[in-house]
Amino acid sequence: MIEVKNVMKKYGRKQVLKGLSFTAEKGEITCLIGINGVGKTTIMKAIMALTPINSGEILIDGEKIRKESFEKVTFIPDTITMLPQMKICDAFAFMADFYKNWDPQRAEELLQFFKLDPTERIANLSKGNMAKVNMILGLALDVDYLLMDEPFSGIDIFSREQIAEVFTSHLIEERGVIITTHEISDIEHLIDRAVLIDNGKVLKEFSVEEVREKEGKSVVDVMREVYRG
Ligand SMILES: Nc1ncnc2c1ncn2[C@@H]1O[C@H](COP(=O)(O)OP(=O)(O)OP(=O)(O)O)[C@@H](O)[C@H]1O
C-alpha cells in the first residue's frame, strides 16, 4: 500500500499541497483527479522522492522511501525521458543496463501488442506511439507500484483504447497503479478508486464501484457534487 499522510509542499512561497492524504492499494488502479496545476504531478514526484516535502509522511508498504524502494515503485512521467536520437531498441537496451528488474520478454510482448517497430527512432514517433513507448519503459519493469502521469493525455481514441486494454490485462493485475488525469470520462471504467483534489487537499476519496452500485453515480456525478458544491 502507498500511504500519503498529511503532506505539505511549498514551491517558494506557493503552498501547493496543504495536508494532503490518501492511500493506494496494490491490485487497484487509483486515479488522482483535479484541474491543471492542482498538484497531481507534485504528489507523484513526492512519492518518488524527486521533490522534497515540507512535512507529512509517505510510506510504501509501511516504509519510508529509500534506495531499495525504487525496486518496488516506478514513475512514468508524461514525457519520454529517452534521447530523441535513440531507437526504441536502444532505449530498451539502456533500460536493461540500468535496471536489474527490467523484463525484456514483457517489453517485447508490449512492443508486439502495440505493433511498434523497434528500429524506429524516438524522435520520429507520433505522439500516441511516443506515449506507448513511454508506457512500455515503465510496464516492463518488474515493480509492485506504477505511477503514471497523464498516460492518456493528447492521444487519439484508438491509441487510448489500446492503452486501456493494457490496463485491464495481466500486465497490470497484481500491481498498484496511481494515475493522474484532468479528463476522467475516457478512463472512468478502468479505475477502482478516485481521489478528488482541490486547493492542496483531498476533497473526497472513494471506491468507484461502490459509489456506482450503492448510489448509482458515476465519477463525473460525484465530481459535479464535490466541485460545484
Ligand atoms: N519546480 C517548480 N517550481 C515552482 N512551482 C512549481 C514547480 N513545479 C510545479 N509548480 C507549481 O505547483 C503547482 C502544481 O503543479 P503540478 O505540476 O504538480 O500540477 P498538476 O496538477 O500536475 O498540473 P497538470 O494537470 O497541468 O499537469 C502549479 O501551480 C505549478 O505551477
Image (cartoon, rainbow, N blue to C red):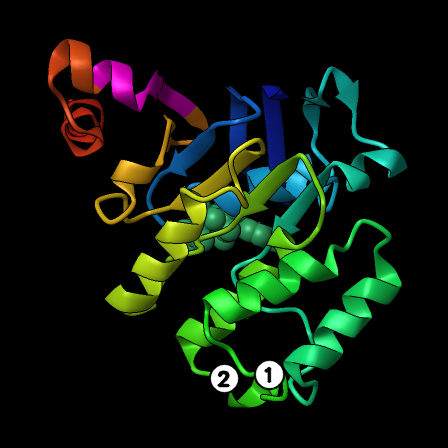
Residue visible at 74% across and 15% down in the picture: 62
**Amino acid at circle 1:** Ile
Whether residue 172 is situated above or below residue 56 in the rendered picture: below
Residue beneath disc 2? 125
Tell whether 4 sits left or right of 32: right
Q: Which residue, given by chain and number where applicable, does mark 1 sit on?
A: 122
Element on which disc 1 rests? helix
Specify start and end residues of the magenta stretch as a single range.
Answer: 202-211
Task: Say which residue appears at 51% left-offset and 35% top-offset.
Answer: 173
Q: Residue at x 40, y 72 (%)?
A: 128
Mark 1 vs mark 2, CA separation in Å: 5 Å
Labelled disc at residue 210: none
Q: Is residue 64 shown left or right of residue 6?
A: right
| Tally of marks | 2
Q: Which of 169 and 79 is in front in this view?
A: 169
**Residue 205 versus residue 198 in the image, above or below:** above
Label 2: how many residues lie within 10 Å, few (<14), some (14-19) or many (20+)?
some
**Viewer can see residue 13:** no
Identify the residue at image location x=45%, y=31%: 30
x and y, in percent, of residue 156 in the image: 28, 69
Image spot of residue 197 (x, y percent): 38, 31
Q: Is residue 118 visible?
A: yes
Nearer to the camera, 188 or 111: 111
